[in-house]
Every structure is written in structure tokens, then in C-alpha cells.
Image (cartoon, rainbow, N blue to C red):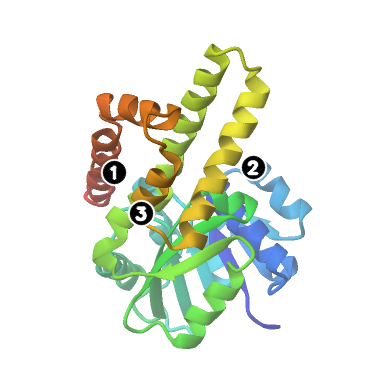
């Protein structure tokens, strides 16, 4: 990967998480990574880790072979105007889009307008915030022209921060809600469970730490046992016991329906973002 250059247009939290994961994986040196953002002072943590920083999006485009688009959907048109290049370039670029709701075909139309003579391919992705600590999930959908080698390189770059899973694009909004929005649901669950323990006299720090670890362990039980979560739940619920009493309270509070509705609301919003 010596001559390969990696770029980020937008150096926000998710781009930073991926950048750190790339450095952790050791497959790309910081000196071969470029990032642009409107405010250079917000990119100091990138330069401190050895990356090249700039306020000029075109600098990233001209220097890089794979470019992550870590910007707001509303800034997309402005960004492509800033890298507009009408002349023929002996260059191939893979754009990795983190933009919720933006279809690959729609992105190609914008790219073709701004870069009509440049050979470009698109990989649409949906990472989540646990990527920041190396425990993320990154869904991805390549266009028909993305090569096996490009997909392999992409997965190697993220190997230090996220589990990558290829999905068909029509599932991106729904699975994106599950993997990228639902961590926030789990934070609410952890907080609420900790509050419940505090109500029973448990110190808050202890309650929060053990609630979080319980969620980690429960997830690992589902993954490692291969059992249906309903069966695992039944194994904890002794007849007439304390766990089934708590499950009954959850059912009275419509927890299942509320989580299903939350996933639906996030999916619908993902689709709406792409129509703005």
C-alpha cells in the first residue's frame, strides 16, 4: 500500500474514529492520509497524529485514491462544486459515502456533473459510534464497478475499528437504523437500568458500570451461544421468580412495541434525509 493515499472530506467524529482505526490496524501510515475541513483549528488532532490537513477539498481530491465523504447531506452539492474538475485526469477515485439516505445512483449523478472525465466508483457505508473504541459495525454496499481489490482494501482499513458487512443497498436505511441509531437506544436502556438500581440504593457509578457490562455480556451470549434471545430469556426466568416478575413489568410497559416503533421511526428518517 505504499503509494496508496487515503482521504477524508470532513474530519468530524465518525471520520476521526475511522482514521484512528486505520492507524490502529497498521495498514496505512498517517503521512499518506489527507483530511479537509472548513476550520483548520478543528483538525489539530489529525495533524498531531501525523495526517496532512487542509481547508481545501480539492487538495484531498487531487492527492487521494480513496476518499471518505464525512459531511452533512446539506453540504454535498457544495463539496462537489469545490472539487469540480472539467479537464481529463489520469486518475481513478473511490468515494466512500457516509451520507444517510443518499443512494449510490444519486451520488454518481452529482459526481458525473462535477467530475465528468474522472473514473470514479462509489462505496456506500453506514458505520456506528462504537467504531470509536474499535467495537463498531460498518455496513457497506459497493456499486457495480467497485473491484474486489478495492473492497478488500476498504475492509483492511477498517479492520482495527469495525466489523464490516456487505449488504444490498435497499436494506441500508433499515439496517443502518439498527446498527447506527440503536446504540443510542441502548444508552437509554443502560441509563434507565442504572437509575432503577440507584432507586434501590445502589451507588450510581457502580450501577452504571455493571449495567453497561451486563449489556455487553448479554450480547456476547446471543452471538456465542447461537441460541434465540427468547430461549436465553426463558433460561433466566424461573417459575414465580424475580426475573419473570421484571419481564412482566416490561411487557406492561410495551417495551417490545416501543423498540420496534423506534427502529421504524429511525428508518423513515434515514429515507427522508436522502430526499432533502
Please tell me the numbered disc located at residue 42. Answer: 2
Q: Which residue is mark 1?
A: 263
- SS for callout 2: helix
Please tell me the numbered disc located at residue 227. Answer: none
Q: Is residue 97 above or below residue 112?
A: above
| Inter-mark Cα distance, 2 to 3 | 27 Å
Q: Residue 156: percent from the left, percent from the top?
A: 59, 75
Residue at 31% from the left image edge and 73% from the top image edge: 112
Q: Compare residues 270 and 276 and report the one nearer the observer.
A: 270
Q: Compare residues 196 and 262 and report the one nearer the observer.
A: 196
Instruction: Using a 10 Å C-alpha cutoff, classify the residue at mark 3 as few (fewer than 14 neighbours), some (14 to 19) or many (20 or more).
Output: many
Q: Is residue 203 above or below residue 138?
A: above
Q: Nearer the viewer, mark 2 or mark 1?
A: 1
- SS for callout 1: helix
| Inter-mark Cα distance, 3 to 1 | 10 Å
Q: Is residue 125 visible?
A: yes
Q: Which residue is mark 3?
A: 176
- Quadrant into which the N terminus falls: bottom right
Q: Splitting the image into 4 quarters, where does residue 209 fall?
A: top right
Sequence-wise, the earlier of marks 3 and 1 is: 3
Q: Splitting the image into 4 quarters, where does residue 169 fall?
A: bottom left
Residue at 40% from the left image edge and 67% from the top image edge: 140
Relative placement, left or right, of 195 versus 85 is right
Q: Compare residues 168 and 53 and report the one nearer the observer.
A: 168
Residue at 37% from the left image edge and 26% from the top image edge: 245
| Inter-mark Cα distance, 2 to 1 | 33 Å
Relative placement, left or right, of 63 versus 78 is right
Look at the numbered discs 2 and 3 and tell me whether their residues touch, using CB distance below 8 Å: no
Instruction: Using a 10 Å C-alpha cutoff, classify the residue at mark 1 as few (fewer than 14 neighbours), some (14 to 19) or many (20 or more).
Output: many
Amino acid at each position: 500500500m505504499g503509494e496508496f493515499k487515503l482521504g477524508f472530506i470532513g474530519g468530524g467524529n465518525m471520520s476521526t474514529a475511522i482514521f484512528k482505526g486505520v492507524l490502529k490496524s497498521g495498514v496505512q501510515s498517517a503521512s499518506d492520509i489527507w483530511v479537509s475541513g472548513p476550520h483548520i483549528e478543528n483538525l489539530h488532532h489529525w495533524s498531531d497524529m501525523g495526517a496532512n490537513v487542509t481547508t481545501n477539498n480539492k487538495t484531498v481530491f487531487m492527492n487521494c485514491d480513496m476518499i471518505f465523504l464525512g459531511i452533512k447531506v446539506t453540504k454535498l452539492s457544495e463539496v462537489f462544486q469545490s472539487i469540480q474538475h472539467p479537464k481529463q485526469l489520469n486518475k481513478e477515485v473511490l468515494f466512500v459515502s457516509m451520507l444517510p439516505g443518499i443512494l449510490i445512483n444519486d451520488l454518481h449523478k452529482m459526481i458525473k456533473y462535477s467530475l465528468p472525465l474522472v473514473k470514479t466508483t462509489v462505496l456506500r457505508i453506514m458505520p456506528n459510534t462504537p467504531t470509536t473504541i474499535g467495537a463498531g459495525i460498518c455496513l457497506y454496499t459497493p456499486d457495480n464497478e467497485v473491484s474486489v481489490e478495492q473492497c478488500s482494501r476498504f475492509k483492511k482499513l477498517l479492520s482495527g475499528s469495525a466489523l464490516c458487512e456487505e449488504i444490498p443497498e435497499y436494506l441500508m436505511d433499515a439496517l443502518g437504523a439498527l446498527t447506527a441509531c440503536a446504540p443510542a437506544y441502548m444508552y437509554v436502556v443502560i441509563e434507565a437500568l442504572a437509575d432503577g438500581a440507584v432507586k434501590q440504593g445502589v451507588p450510581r457509578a457502580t450501577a452504571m458500570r455493571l449495567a453497561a457490562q451486563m449489556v455487553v455480556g448479554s450480547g456476547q451470549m446471543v452471538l456465542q451461544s447461537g441460541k434465540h434471545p427468547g430461549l436465553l430469556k426463558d433460561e433466566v426466568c424461573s417459575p414465580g421468580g424475580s426475573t419473570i416478575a421484571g419481564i412482566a413489568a416490561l411487557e406492561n410497559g410495551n417495551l417490545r412495541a416501543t423498540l420496534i416503533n423506534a427502529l421504524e421511526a429511525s428508518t423513515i428518517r434515514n429515507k427522508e434525509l436522502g430526499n432533502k
